[in-house]
Amino acid sequence: MFEILTPKNLTIKIIICLAVLVVIMCLCTLVGTPKISLEEVFAGPGREPGHNIHYEIFAGVRLPRVILAALVGAALASAGVILQALLRNPLADPYILGISSGAGLGAIIAVISGITFTFWAGSPIAVFAFCGAMLTICLVWYIGRFAAKSQVTSLLLAGVVVNAFFSAVMMFLTSIARSEHLRTTIYWLMGNITEKDWSVLSIGAFFIVGGIIILFIICNKLNALTLGEHEAKALGVDTTKVKAIAFAFSALITAVAVNLSGLIGFVGLIIPHGTRLVFGPDHRQLLPLSAIIGSIFLVIADTIARTVFRQEQLPVGVITAIAGGPFFLFLLAKYSRKVSWLK
Amino acid sequence: MNAIIKVENLTFGYTQSLVLKDFGFELKQGQFLTIAGPNGAGKTTLLNLLCGLLKPKAGFIEIDAADIQSYSVKELARKIAVVHQEFVPVFDFTVQQMVSMARTPYLGTFGFESDTDKEIVADALEMTDTIQFASRPLAQLSGGERQRVFIARALAQNTPVLLLDEPTSFLDFKHQVGIYDLLKAAQLEKGKTIVSVTHDINLAAQYADIALLLGADTGYHIGCVKDIFSVEQIEKVFSVRTFSASVGKENFFLPLGKFAKDSRIIISESADS
């Protein structure tokens, strides 16, 4: 009569989405100049490096880039899902709330101050980015506690202020710093996906995929938490613990994503929302499917960004913002009206 | 039989005022308690103390012969289910998803329902007659239907105790009676202990076994419904004049203000007698 979520049908959905992702990733590696053909790629690297140019482009340039886009898309969409649940606000997103800027500011401070130390698996940039994201998330949460009782929009307003402030500080810091890296830094701020080597990718993949798996474990408790803290406690959810895990790991994956590709907006807003429309609000399903669909979205967006102009590559953040901005306004209008109806 | 809820020497207050002082009562498994009293008497506060959301300043609360503080959040959710006032959730959960959340304190690591969980949820939907709109989002239901869904969820939580905060406010006559019939059925068929806060003492009197009347100060009265809901007590605690009569076993009350149409008749009647 009606569908009940079981591990079996969730697994089937995840496998189907993953298959679509893989197909799209393959197609996207073939798009662009110079053209490469799959046939040549499968011929292998050849006897010596540089022998098969098709393979070189595929394995050295296109594939890492597509994988990076997939990782960042998954991270941002998942962080969006978690933040929306925690703040009980369908308009939350790591970029809109200023958490991405927080991570970005942390990273820039690390770059400019020139601190060099290695901390477990992270460079100083990664550690600073994580701290920046975590601090911002706490700040937004603190503001959100006041905002939750009034309106959906006041939390967003707080996010806008946080975002503008951090962006200004970042611009200031990049201006006073040596200008040789200025162009790359600004591109990074606008959200730019470039080729990364495999070691960077594998560390990123470890944190992002690991973070999403840990967040998946608390998903059934997040369902209860979206009803409010009293309700969640009545349903046996240790709200303090669940919130701490959710905040820490969504900050972590946001920070890793920002580290890899700068500030990419609206993925965490559009993707969870669209996924929720199709598959419903159950977070056990929403989180994994949003992650995969986020990957698909960003792989396509990045392919558009690097092929739309022949000479120049656009930062992918430009594409996501062009797609996401109007969508955000539409949602804002929709929810503001819904909230005022409830009063 | 042992007491399922035991409250002793309970004291609780907010910064300015004391709400409960040296308060105590006992409730046995399978009893139906209704809590009434004027606004600000501490009805909801008491309910929140009983479900562990608030901690007492002094005294203790025992649930199933163990101190409420000794339970973890998860363990307590297996003893007590709470129905707060009806609301519309932010996200569009369906009725079935909402009722399934009742199984949260019983789920394993990844949080998926077992076949037993699904059966319990289906039973609760069946009993509350909400199965017909199980696949619809809560926002599309009327207030009365939504309240039934929250009661279904509380039933599916499979706890010996059920706490409800004004379960029939904002509902029409038919739905008010529907909710109380449902609660009574849960009490009689499943042996649930029910504690319900209400403003509608007339309706509650028809269903509850025990009544607790909280005064505006820290005073309180507890006992069988007929004794507690007496004319003198009601008029004193609520500080309002009432017209009262009895139907069958229970008294009922009609509050009368100065300008109420029938106010003068009652005054002249009482003056005559």
Image (cartoon, rainbow, N blue to C red):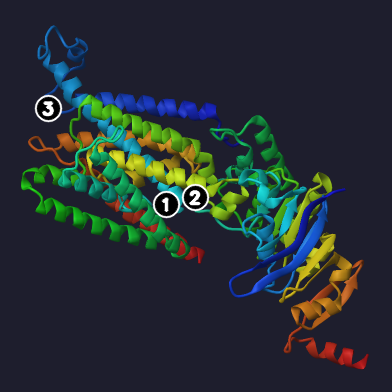
| Dot 2: chain letter | B
Q: Are marks 2 and 1 in contact (CB under 8 Å)?
A: yes
The three-letter amino acid code for the residue at tag 3 is Thr
Mark 2 element type: loop
Instruction: Please tell me which residue is depicted at 49% across the width and 42% down the height of the picture.
Output: A280
| Sequence-earlier tag: 3 or 1 | 3
Image location of residue A211, percent across then percent down = 39, 35
Mark 3 crowdedness (10 Å alpha carbons): few <14, some 14-19, many ≥20: few
Instruction: Please tell me which residue is depicted at 58% across the width and 58% down the height of the picture.
Output: B87
The three-letter amino acid code for the residue at tag 2 is Phe
Quick check: do tags 3 and 1 share a chain? yes
| Dot 3: chain letter | A
Distance CA(mark 3)–CA(mark 1)? 39 Å
Image height check: is A330 above or below B45?
Answer: above
**As drawn, is A80 to the left or to the right of B172?**
left
Taking depth in this image into account, of B251 and B28 the one nearest to the observer is: B28
Mark 1 crowdedness (10 Å alpha carbons): few <14, some 14-19, many ≥20: many
The image quadrant that residue B260 belongs to is: bottom right
Which residue corresponds to mark 2? B91
Mark 2 crowdedness (10 Å alpha carbons): few <14, some 14-19, many ≥20: many
Image height check: is A314 above or below B57?
Answer: above
Taking depth in this image into account, of B112 and A339 the one nearest to the observer is: B112
Taking depth in this image into account, of A126 and A280 the one nearest to the observer is: A126
Mark 3 element type: loop
**As drawn, is A105 to the left or to the right of A234?**
left
Quick check: do tags 2 and 3 share a chain? no
Quick check: do tags 2 and 1 share a chain? no
Image quadrant where one finds the C terminus of chain B: bottom right
